[in-house]
């Protein structure tokens, strides 16, 4: 089983890597801040490309997200909706305290499945 990791720099605020293997979920490891629509456009495009290939089990690893505003939340919600609409699932792992507080305040913690680790998130798809 081979796993691929690709690192992409979007701008000074946000970078991400993806890990995937043929049978596992696609993991987006996000780092930095999501403050503008431009911050998330490249990730959204890669998410769309994966969904088109039938790879619609997605993990957003938010461990290194320092801050996210309403634009960032909208990006996560629209990504969740896209994957659900194709019969897939998007889950979140390794949420920082700041982002967790944001999810609780907005009650999005009741919508998203969140996991302590990426591994737990990936294992959730095989149930």
Image: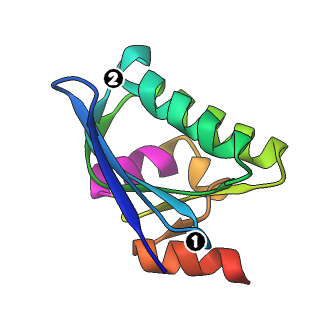
Residue 53 appears left or right of 122: right
- Residue that appears at 58% across and 81% down: 123
Do the residues bearing badges 2 and 1 touch, measured as CB atoms within 8 Å?
A: no
Among the two numbered marks 2 and 1 on one chain, the one whose residue lies closer to the N terminus: 1
Helix or strand or loop: what does disc 2 sit on? Answer: loop
Residue 35 appears left or right of 49: left
Give how far across and how far down residue 64 sits, in percent.
24, 52
**Can residue 17 be seen at all in this image of the molecule?**
yes
**Can residue 73 be seen at all in this image of the molecule?**
no
Categorize mark 2 by other alpha carbons within 10 Å: few (<14), some (14-19), many (20+). some
In the picture shown, does residue 28 fall above or below 114?
A: above
Give how far across and how far down residue 31 sits, in percent.
25, 45
Image mark for residue 42: none
- Residue that appears at 15% across and 25% down: 12
Query: Is residue 101 one of those drawn in magenta?
Result: yes
Image mark for residue 35: 2
Magenta-tinted stretch: 96-104
17, 5: nearer the viewer: 5
Query: Is residue 100 one of those drawn in magenta?
Result: yes
- The residue where tag 1 is placed is 24
The quadrant in which residue 45 appears is: top right
Q: Residue furthest front?
A: 2
């Amino acid at each position: 089983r081979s796993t691929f990791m690709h690192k992409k720099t979007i701008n000074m605020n946000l970078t991400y890597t993806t890990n995937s293997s043929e049978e596992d979920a696609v993991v987006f490891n996000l780092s930095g801040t999501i403050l503008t629509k431009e911050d998330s456009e490249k990730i959204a495009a890669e998410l769309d490309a994966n969904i088109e290939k039938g790879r619609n089990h997605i993990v957003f690893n938010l461990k290194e997200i320092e801050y996210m505003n309403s634009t960032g939340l909208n990006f996560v919600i629209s990504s969740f909706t896209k994957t659900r609409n194709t019969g897939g699932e998007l889950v979140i792992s390794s949420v920082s305290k700041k982002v967790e507080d944001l999810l609780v305040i907005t009650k999005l913690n009741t919508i998203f499945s969140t996991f302590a680790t990426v591994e737990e998130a990936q294992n959730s798809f095989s149930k």
